Image (cartoon, helix red, strand yellow):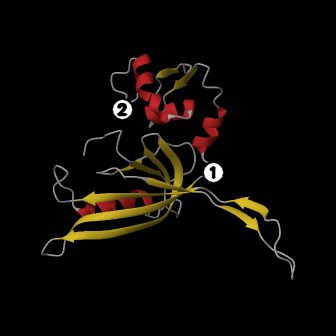
Amino acid sequence: MPEQLTNLKIMGKEKGDDTAYSLVFETMFNPNSYTVNHKLNFDTKQAPGTAGGEPEFKNKEPETFTLEFMMDATGASKPPVLIKKQVSDFNNVTTSMNGKTHRPNYLLVQWGTFIRECVLQSANITYTLFTLEGISLRAKVNATFIERADSELNARASMFSSPDLTHTIEVKDGDLLPLLTYKTYRDQKYYLQVARINRLKNFRKLKPGTQLIFPPLS
């Protein structure tokens, strides 16, 4: 199906470095919501015979988030894509073991202004709406991801100075304008304004080596 920046994308790569994400899974329908989970661990040990003690902070676990989305093969998409093929494409990006690194891919989840570098923790797929032959026409995916706290995206984003200053960025192979906008402003919603300022005719396909100007926020 044609690329749509508004649809949820899960992108994968074999290494956790600054290489481009070469694998892309795009959902047919966007989730209705997502859940972000924070967990802080405290030591609550107390002496025998006491009523309680002050919880002592131990650590903060990596942030996790859960997305639920639907796959459909009833004809809602044109042409319809078999559920088996959609699940295979999802697994190829998220769960398949990479032969070189002997681990699943590193991931980037992008949906609107929500961008996270992460890895998949779990995925539950529920198949529904079957044909007389027992072929599923619909599936619901519930996927939980663990955020990479030391990701290159976060490291690069922290290197940018104040959004009140003008930045010039050279496009690299695989860069996306919404992602570059997020790195600069910590908010993706300004990418259309950046496209107009730089007079980009096709902001979906950035040419490597192009110098883009990111002006101060007004």
Q: Quadrant of residue 208?
A: top left
Q: Residue 59, located in which quarter of the rendered image?
A: bottom right
The label number, if any, that marks residue 195 in the structure image: none
Single out the mark in the foreground, 1 or 2.
1
Front in this rendered view, residue 192 or 50: 50
SS of the residue under disc 2: loop
Crowd around label 1: few <14 · some 14–19 · many ≥20 (10 Å): some
Q: Is 148 left or right of 189, judged from the image as shown?
A: right
Q: Amino acid at mark 1?
A: Ala
Kind of residue at disc 2:
Arg
**Percent x, y of residue 80:** 18, 55
Residue 118 is situated, as x and y percent measured from the top left of the image, at: 53, 53
| Label 2, residues with CA under 10 Å away: few <14, some 14-19, many ≥20 | some
Residue lying at the far front in this picture: please name it: 51
Image quadrant in which the C terminus is located: top right
Tell which of 98 and 38 is nearer to you: 38
Q: CA distance from mark 1 to mark 2?
A: 28 Å
Q: Is residue 191 above or below residue 146?
A: above
Indicate the position of residue 158 as horizontal and vertical percent values. 65, 36
In the image, what residue occupies the spot 17% across and 59% down?
74
175 sits to left or right of 58 = left
- The residue at the point 41 percent across, 63 percent down is 142
Question: Is label 1 in a helix, a strand or a loop?
Answer: loop
Q: Which mark is residue 204?
A: 2
- Residue 16 visible in the snapshot: yes
Q: Give the image quarter of residue 52.
A: bottom right
- Decide which of tag 1 and tag 2 comes sooner along the chain: 1
Q: Which residue is label 1 attached to?
A: 149
Q: Is residue 171 above or below residue 138?
A: above
Residue 43 location in percent, x, y? 77, 68
